[in-house]
Structures are given as C-alpha cells and as structure tokens.
Image (tube, rainbow, N blue to C red):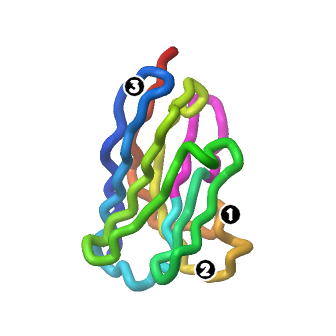
Amino acid sequence: QVQLVESGGGLVQAGGSLRLSCAVSGRTLIYYRMGWFRQAPGKEREFVAAINWSDDSTYYVDSVKGRFTISRDNAKNTVDLQMNSLKPEDTAVYHCAGSRFSTSTYAREISKYDYWGQGTQVTVYS
C-alpha cells in the first residue's frame, strides 16, 4: 500500500509564493519518479513537474519553467514544489503521483503515473 499526502496549498496574491509538499509512505521503492500535476476547474489534469528519486533529473512544463522548482528528500520521502511568481492561471488543485517507469520519455505522461494523492488547492488572485 502506498499513500501520497499533499500539503501546502492556499490562497496567495499574484506574484507571491507557495511551497507544496508530498509525503510518500508505504512501498516507496516501487517508484522511479515523482510528479506534480494540476487540474483547474473545467480543464483536464496537466503535467507540471517531475523528479527522479535516484538522480537529479527534473522535468517541467514550459509554463512554469523559471518559476517552479521541484525537489526531493530521499531520507524523509518527500517531494516539494516551490512555486514563485505565481499567476492567476496557476490556480488549480495540485496532485502528486508516482511513476514506476524509468524512461525519460514518460516523465510527462499522466497515464504512466499511479497512486495519486488527494490534492491540495492553490488559488492565486490578482
């Protein structure tokens, strides 16, 4: 059994920052990569960022490059998403998920992730 629990969401003014955290418990060794995804009202869930557990490889969607930073703490089994210069269009429910696929081509593929967390709401107002 694997559990993913997100925290750190909230209400922030445009230009502000938030730090999301995903705590991973259970059979964590089955995962090669952890990702953050988001889903805005009326829209499909989209990839935001991902990081491998075993090396420093990171992946980002173009719209957050230079503003968001994903990091991991292997000892604590946590994956964080530091979000700076937030925009109203970043408003969404943010979910973390784990992937057992090592191929880098799959890093942004939502279908290659399973064991999703319940999500945390991020609301950015202008």
Q: How far across and down, in percent of the image, does residue 80 sit?
A: 39, 57
User: Is disc 3 placed on a helix, strand or loop?
Assistant: strand
How many tags in the picture? 3
Helix, strand or loop under label 2:
loop
| In-front residue for pair 60/9 | 60
12 horizontally vs 111: left or right? left
Rendered image: mark on residue 109: 1
Name the image quarter holding the N terminus: bottom left
Give, as a three-letter code, the residue at label 1.
Glu
Rendered residue at 49%/26% (across/down): 15
Q: Separation of disc 1 and disc 3 at Cα? A: 29 Å
Question: Tag 1, which secondary structure?
Answer: loop
Residue occupied by mark 2: 101
x then y, percent, for residue 47: 62, 53
Q: Nearer the viewer, mark 3 or mark 2?
A: 3
Task: Give the Cα separation between the discs numbered 3 and 2.
Answer: 34 Å
Q: Earlier in the sequence, mark 3 or mark 2?
A: 3
Q: Dot 3: few (<14), some (14–19), or many (≥20) neighbours within 10 Å?
A: some
* Residue appearing at x 45%, y 66% in the figure: 115
- Is the C-beta separation of discs 1 and 3 under 8 Å? no
Residue type (three-letter) at the residue carrying disc 2 = Phe
Closer to the eye: label 1 or 3 = 3
Give the mark, 1 or 2, whose residue is nearer the N terminus.
2
Q: Which residues are magenta?
A: 36-47
Disc number placed over residue 12 in the picture, else none: 3
